[in-house]
């Protein structure tokens, strides 16, 4: 009987399950379906962008020359670092270290702010050069995709702020699946940018 | 737990290095096919780190891990194919 449970009074049940059965999905199922839906929407955008580029090679090449690759690089490093601190904060909340969790989440949000500031500065630079969403196909897609991604960043920052407050209130004492769900959302936003960055700035 | 933190730190350093490498090869590789394949292979490597280490799906049920990994495998393959056609 591999799954036999032997309990003494007051003892927590320990199941001797095989390793594969002990594996669990972090966060809650609804958040993962939401993440999959978001990824699907962005996949359509990315494929659409690539197809449009192949149909307008010269226009896309010239338009990309007007972007600042350094801004894209700074934003990539900022988002990766932000995700890194969120991953660390999850380890802290698992240990019940609420204050350290809040500190890591705050640092993660500081890096997210760097992303937002750089992205807005990039938009302002383009607007100053009389470039907007109607300039050509490239900039229509550029503004559409990056602004949509920026909205996800802003929503993620609200979620991270909420998680920070909840951690400080010691509200993850009974379980941290909500924390895991919020962290997974933030990592998804990071993962999307990792595809977006080479598509717009490098290729 | 310290080992897990070490995984996260090494994953972060790997992601940073891959990002800088992707920018670097964008300036040095002239061959279009090699460039596209390398860039999207880097996207896959970075995505795999995020899925397995940051999202902790490396310790999740396999179907969920592969569902997310398929995104960073299939999407770069589809986009690369579009660019190489």
Image (spheres, coloured by chain):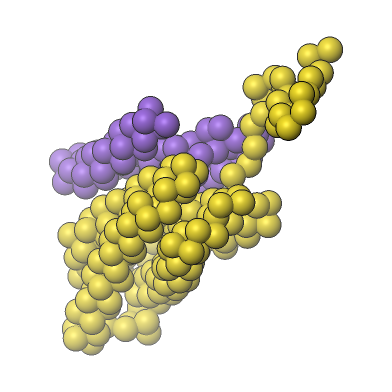
Chain colours: A yellow, B purple
Taking depth in this image into account, of A96 and A34 the one nearest to the observer is: A96
User: Would residue B81 be found to the left or right of residue A25 on screen?
Assistant: left
The foreground one among B14 and A163 is: A163
Name the residue located 78 percent from the left edge and 24 percent from the top edge.
Answer: A7
- Compared to residue A176, the image places residue B67 above or below, namely above
Q: Position of residue A139 (x, y in %)?
A: 35, 75
| Residue at left offset 19%, top offset 79% | A125
Q: Quadrant of the N terminus of chain A?
A: top right
Q: Is residue A21 visible?
A: no
Left/right placement of residue A179 relative to residue B16 reads: right
Q: Residue furthest top?
A: A1
Q: Is residue A121 above or below residue A194?
A: below
Q: Please name the residue shown 26% across and 38% down the image.
A: B13
- Tell whether A32 sits left or right of B58: right
Could you tell me how many numbered marks the image carries?
A: 0
Kindly identify the residue that appears in the image at 19 percent across and 86 percent down. Answer: A128
Q: List x then y, in percent, for residue A59.
A: 30, 68
Residue A145, image x, y percentages = 43, 69
From the viewer's side, name the closer residue of A7 and A101: A7
Answer yes or no: is residue A73 visible. yes
Determine the residue located farthest toward the right in the rendered image: A1
B5 sits left or right of A45 in the view = left
Vertical comparison of B51 with A7: above or below: below
- Residue B64's quadrant in the figure? top right
Residue B2 higher or lower than B33, as above or below: above
- Residue A194 x, y percent position in the rendering: 37, 51
């Amino acid at each position: 009987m591999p799954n036999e449970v032997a309990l003494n009074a007051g003892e927590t049940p320990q199941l001797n399950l095989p390793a594969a059965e002990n594996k669990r999905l972090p966060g809650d199922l609804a958040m993962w379906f939401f993440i999959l839906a978001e990824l699907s929407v962005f996949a359509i955008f990315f494929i659409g962008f690539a197809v449009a580029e192949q149909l307008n090679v010269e226009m896309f090449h010239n338009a990309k020359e007007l972007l600042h690759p350094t801004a894209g690089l700074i934003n990539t490093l900022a988002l990766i670092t932000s995700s890194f601190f969120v991953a660390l904060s999850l380890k802290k909340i698992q240990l019940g270290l609420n204050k350290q969790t809040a500190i890591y989440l705050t640092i993660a949000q500081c890096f997210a702010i760097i992303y937002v500031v750089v992205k807005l500065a990039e938009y302002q630079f383009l607007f100053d050069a009389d470039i907007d969403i109607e300039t050509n196909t490239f900039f229509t897609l550029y503004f559409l995709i990056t602004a949509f991604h920026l909205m996800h960043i802003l929503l993620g920052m609200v979620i991270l702020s909420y998680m920070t407050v909840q951690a400080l209130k010691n509200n993850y004492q009974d379980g941290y699946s909500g924390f895991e769900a919020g962290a997974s959302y933030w990592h998804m936003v990071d993962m999307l940018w990792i595809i977006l960055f080479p598509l717009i700035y490098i290729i | 737990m310290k080992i897990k933190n070490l995984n996260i730190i090494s994953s972060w350093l790997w992601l940073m290095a891959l990002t800088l490498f992707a920018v670097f090869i964008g300036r040095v590789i002239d061959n279009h096919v090699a460039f596209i394949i390398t860039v999207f292979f880097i996207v896959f490597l970075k995505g795999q780190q995020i899925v397995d280490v940051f999202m902790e799906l490396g310790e999740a049920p396999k179907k969920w891990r592969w569902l997310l990994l398929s995104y960073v495998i299939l999407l770069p393959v589809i986009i690369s194919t579009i660019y190489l056609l």
